[in-house]
């Protein structure tokens, strides 16, 4: 089964003074998911959103909330994050010594579980968890800050993840995050990604949010039609 291309708009690049309006505008422009990065200043150097922002986003939109936990000991917060409104919860393989248990915890809480891998981590490191997750997030930049340059060496990893999933007979969501714009979309889609996390290229698009999302989807459609 071929999964649809989805754009998950990253609030990290939104105007925080108008967050509700920006979420509403993204939804109206055709965003499929809303991506929320939770950072603790420990696993990654930056500090970002917490539960109040997830709750506020849930009140603002009916779109799925795609919550990416860039934190140590995520198991302490899974239930609260899902209760706040998360539909998808992704944790980092590097942050979870007992990854299988955390994935089970996410599913039991009522959300779709995902696992993320940083640019340095080989795809084979998550092979044994693939039967239990609904999403793999391949970081195409080093996590912690928006607006970074895409790392082209991650393309091979995207393809590896998709091929490993196919070998298991699973149509999981393969998500990419970091440096995703119209010019990199074709590359990641060609290698098997179907969920595009985009912040700067959407909320910072010179012609507006609608144009930013349209550019990503058009680039994906052109690649699929080749």
Image (cartoon, rainbow, N blue to C red):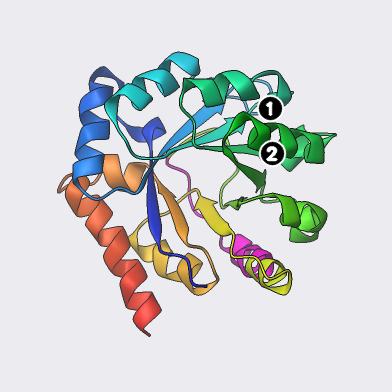
Within 10 Å of the Cα at label 2, are there few (<14), some (14-19), or many (20+) other Cα atoms? many
- Compute the Cα span from label 1 to label 2: 9 Å
Answer with left or right where residue 163 lies relative to residue 94: left
In terms of secondary structure, where does tag 1 sit?
loop
User: Taking 208 as reference, is 213 above or below it?
Assistant: below
Left or right: 9 in relation to 149: left
* Residue 150 point in image, percent of width and height: 50, 54
Q: Examine the rendered structure and indicate whether residue 160 appears above or below residue 125.
A: below
Q: Is residue 132 left or right of residue 9?
A: right
Residue drawn 68% across the image and 68% down it: 160
Q: Is residue 85 visible?
A: yes
Which numbered dot is residue 64? none
Q: Pointer 1 and pointer 2: residues touching (CB < 8 Å)?
A: yes
Q: Which residue is mark 1?
A: 43
Question: Secondary structure under badge 2?
Answer: strand
* Residue 164 lies in quadrant: bottom right
Q: Is residue 158 magenta?
A: yes
Which quadrant would residue 155 be assigned to in this image? bottom right
Which residue is outermost to the top? 52
Q: Residue 92: give its label.
A: 2
Placement of the C terminus among the 4 image quadrants = bottom left
For image coordinates 31% across by 31% down, the residue present is: 14
Answer yes or no: is residue 15 visible: no
Residue, x 20% and y 47% (percent of image)? 29
Position above or below: 32 against 37: below
Numbered range of the magenta stretch: 147-161
- In x, y percent, where is residue 126? 77, 53
**Between 166 and 210, which is closer to the camera in this rendering?**
166
State the image coordinates of residue 203 (x, y, percent, origin top left): 27, 39
């Amino acid at each position: 089964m071929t999964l649809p291309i989805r754009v998950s708009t990253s609030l990290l690049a939104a105007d925080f003074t108008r967050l509700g309006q920006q979420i509403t505008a993204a939804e109206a422009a055709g965003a499929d998911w809303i991506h929320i990065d939770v950072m603790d200043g420990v696993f990654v150097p930056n500090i970002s959103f917490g539960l109040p922002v997830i709750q506020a986003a849930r009140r603002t939109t009916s779109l799925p909330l795609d919550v990416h936990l860039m934190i140590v000991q995520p198991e302490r917060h899974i239930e609260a994050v899902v209760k706040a409104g998360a539909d998808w919860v992704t944790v980092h393989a590097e942050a979870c010594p007992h990854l299988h248990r955390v994935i089970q915890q996410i599913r039991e809480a009522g959300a779709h579980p995902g696992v993320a891998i940083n640019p340095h981590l080989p795809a084979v490191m998550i092979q044994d968890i693939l039967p239990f997750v609904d999403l793999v997030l391949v970081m195409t930049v080093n996590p912690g800050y928006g607006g970074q340059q895409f790392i082209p060496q991650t393309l091979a990893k995207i393809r590896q993840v998709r091929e490993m999933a196919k070998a298991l007979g699973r149509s999981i969501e393969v998500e990419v995050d970091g440096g995703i714009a119209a010019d990199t979309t074709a590359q990641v889609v060609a290698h098997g990604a179907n969920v595009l996390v985009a912040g700067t290229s959407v909320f910072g698009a010179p012609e507006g949010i609608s144009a930013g999302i349209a550019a990503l989807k058009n680039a994906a459609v052109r690649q699929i039609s080749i």
